[in-house]
């Protein structure tokens, strides 16, 4: 997807700081020498599935959205388990994810595909813009000293898992069971930020571009029902219907039976049947995305048309200076009319989206 929201200089990748992250992607090639043993392959698959649950059930549905309740010890275990995925600590993760929901698909969104697919998938992590944690957004979590401790030493979980993979399955265990599994887990998780906003269907007219995708749900243990999720982020269940595969939800239900968690929130029936695109609700999220693209195209045409007219005329010489002035002023006038139309449509739909968001937040 083309970049339609311009990036700032802060959004550029910091290649030096990202070197360890990139190096992780190269290490699995060492499997050429270590081979892939059955034990290493099983360890890698189990490590992917279990850690995906800690991200989806823990970092996302619990810490970011508080969609269920958990005793303090379970909360700490969810936090520590999440750190083994090497996606920083729960406070950093939740503060950024809450910002994504607050500003989805606007210039303030940390990973909107409207800033380019690459940026939404991986570029935002490699930039310097999002390294800090906004503690004001996670006061409810930061008040627990054990969570602050786990946050501070968030690398420990990954190191322990790496050591375990080596002890269980040797060098192949380390290379395949830990490194390859971790890289796969990262990209699986990142598809929710990138693919789940461009691929799939929209059931609900949310103010963003989120979509429901069975493929992303399969890769992420149920997070692919992302349009459902943006419609009702409070829900611990993201597959709203029985045919929407949501393994994270099944595990949470099992944990509730064992009294490890409680008060799992689900969408009330009236929420599930509200704002349906197929019943004619204005799909404000997509309308806004299309107008944002139109505004970007018009802004780009100002640059390219301006240059081409100037260059073309310069090559012929000054003989047609009068024609050039006339042509340029006509083009400028038409562009201004077009720009004004696009800008006013975009601001109207932006205002409508803001009102909808406020309405949903206070509901
Ligand atoms: Zn989203
Ligand atoms: Zn969310």
Image: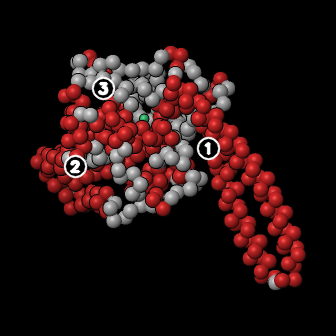
**Mark toward the start of the polypeptide (2 vs 1):** 2
SS at mark 1?
helix
| Residue wearing tag 1 | 289
Question: Residue 3: which quarter of the image?
Answer: bottom right
Residue visible at 79% across and 62% down in the picture: 332
Residue 251's label in the rendered image is: 3
Packing grade of label 1 (10 A; few <14, some 14-19, many >=20) is: many
Q: In the image, is residue 252 above or below residue 108?
A: above
In the rendered image, is residue 39 in sight?
Answer: yes
Number of numbered discs present?
Answer: 3
The reply to whether callout 2 and callout 3 are in contact (CB within 8 Å) is no
Packing grade of label 3 (10 A; few <14, some 14-19, many >=20) is: some
Packing grade of label 2 (10 A; few <14, some 14-19, many >=20) is: some
In the rendered image, is residue 53 in sight?
Answer: no
Residue visible at 55% across and 45% down in the picture: 106
Q: In the image, is residue 186 above or below residue 214?
A: below
């Amino acid at each position: 997807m083309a970049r339609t929201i311009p990036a700032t200089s802060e959004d550029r990748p910091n290649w030096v700081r990202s070197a360890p992250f990139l190096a992780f992607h190269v290490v699995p090639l060492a499997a050429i020498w270590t081979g892939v043993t059955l034990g290493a392959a099983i360890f890698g698959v189990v490590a992917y599935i279990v850690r995906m649950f800690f991200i989806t059930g823990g970092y996302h549905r619990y810490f970011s959205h508080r969609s269920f309740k958990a005793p303090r010890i379970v909360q700490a275990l969810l936090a520590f388990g999440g750190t083994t995925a090497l996606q920083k600590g729960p406070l950093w993760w939740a503060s950024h994810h809450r910002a994504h929901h607050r500003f989805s698909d606007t210039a303030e969104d940390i990973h909107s595909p409207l800033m380019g697919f690459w940026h939404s998938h991986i570029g935002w992590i490699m930039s310097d813009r999002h390294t800090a944690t906004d503690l004001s957004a996670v006061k409810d979590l930061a008040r627990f000293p054990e969570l602050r401790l786990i946050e501070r030493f968030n690398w420990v979980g990954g190191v322990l898992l790496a050591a375990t993979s080596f002890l269980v399955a040797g060098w192949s265990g380390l290379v395949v069971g830990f490194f390859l599994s971790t890289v796969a887990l990262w990209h699986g998780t990142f598809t929710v930020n990138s693919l789940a906003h461009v691929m799939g269907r929209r059931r609900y007219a949310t103010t963003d571009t989120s979509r429901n995708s069975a493929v992303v749900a399969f890769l992420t243990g149920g997070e692919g029902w992302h349009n459902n999720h943006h419609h009702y982020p409070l829900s611990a269940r993201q597959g709203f219907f029985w045919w929407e595969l949501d393994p994270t939800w099944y595990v949470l239900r099992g944990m509730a039976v064992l009294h490890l968690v409680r008060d799992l929130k689900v969408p009330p029936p009236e929420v599930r049947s509200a704002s349906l695109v197929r019943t004619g609700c204005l799909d404000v999220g997509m309308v806004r995305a299309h107008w944002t693209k139109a505004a970007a195209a018009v802004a780009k045409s100002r640059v390219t048309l301006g240059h081409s007219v100037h260059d073309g005329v310069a090559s012929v010489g000054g003989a047609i200076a009068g024609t050039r002035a006339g042509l340029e002023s006509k083009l400028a006038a038409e562009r201004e009319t077009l720009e004004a139309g696009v800008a006013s449509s975009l601001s109207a739909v932006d205002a409508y989206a803001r009102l909808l968001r406020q309405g949903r937040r206070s509901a």
